[in-house]
Amino acid sequence: MKTLKRLPVAARRLWVLFVLLLAQVWVGTLSTGCAPGTPTESDGKLQVVATTGMIADLARQVGGGRVQVHGLMGPGVDPHLYKATAADVERLGRARLVLFNGLHLEARLADVFAHLPNARSVALAEDLPGVELLRDPDGQAPDPHLWFDVEAWSRVARRLGDELASADPAGADEYRARAGELEARLLALHHEVLEQVGRLPRERRILVTAHDAFQYFGRAYGFEVRGLQGISTAAETGAADVAALARMLAERRVPALFVESSVPHRTVEAVLEAARALGHEARLGGELYSDALGGADGPAGTYEGMVRSNVATILAALEDKP
């Protein structure tokens, strides 16, 4: 309860609403004669809720046919600002396993996950063996965007295998086998990205985006990264931030900057106008997928597809001279 008291009034009200909705789900579950944690679908699959598209995609691959994965956040949804719906709460109340990123990506939903009546909740990006987390410029908040380092994110596959095996021991061998296959495939993708970016001269590896989501990408693949907003899109952006970024573009003759699918484009367009006023004609390099996957039918509808789509967009824009 101490954590609740420290929250702003609006956040406390949201938390209380969430708990009340969960209570309704709990009562509804008892009234229908289902034991807590029993999957309600007739196929009897393990019920899993995942927050982001990146996590849901990996969970489906590792879970296979034994698991029903419900993703809370679809294409274009910003997890930093996400507010759950009543339908989401109902799914959470019936889940056996809730998978989330952690590191404050999902705002304060982690407090709600810890109080779910039926489910175990797991922060997949926290405490991964051998992974050094980045932090914001003030050294206070952890950077949650770990999935942009594909090698680091590959370790999530193994954790998923272990968590699913714990929730459904009868399928343990299947889960761990698929997790191993996925981990190997992601490590191969990491080396594929290294090979592709290797053809771009280091002096041209300057990645400028709408918010500071790509620092892990920069560390892993040798890019200097600048974001207009901070690591959370909840951070405010002012005229001074726009002007400073525009000066950097003009002074270093950066050819392009990028919008993001889950962040409004207007602030990036303001930077372009400010750079133009300084005599530098930068351009939009394209749209990157940062905190959400693309549509299910598109090339960025899976985690691996998102990585390849982003890399192709970045290289196409930065390889061409202004």
Image (spheres, rainbow, N blue to C red):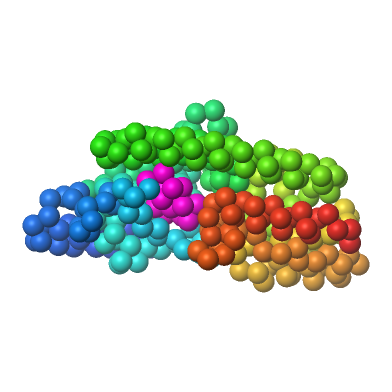
Instruction: Return the x and y of residue 245 as percentages of the image width and height.
Output: 77, 58
| Residue 262 visible in image | no
Q: Is residue 280 left or right of residue 294?
A: right
- Reply yes or no: does residue 52 show up in magenta: yes
Residue shown at the point (46%, 63%) measured from the top left: 74
- Foreground pick, 185 / 101: 185
- Using the image, determine if residue 101 lies above or below residue 260: above
**Residue projecting furthest to the top:** 130
Is there any visible trace of residue 63 in the rendered image?
yes
Quarter in which the C terminus is drawn = bottom right
- Nearer to us in this view, 275 or 179: 179
Furthest residue toward right: 279
Span colored in magenta: 50-63
Picture coordinates of residue 62, whole percent (x, y): 41, 44
What secondary structure is the stretch in magenta mostly built from?
helix
| Residue 53 falls left or right of residue 277 | left
Q: Residue at x 67, y 38 (%)?
A: 191
For the image shown, how many numbered marks are present on the structure? 0
Q: Position of residue 304 (x, y in %)?
A: 57, 50
Q: Residue at x 64, y 52 (%)?
A: 308
Q: Nearer the viewer, residue 149 or 307?
A: 307
Q: Does residue 277 sit above or below 304 in this rendering?
A: below
Q: Is residue 207 left or right of residue 37?
A: right
Query: Which residue shows up at 59% across the image and 55% down it?
Result: 306
93 in the magenta segment: no
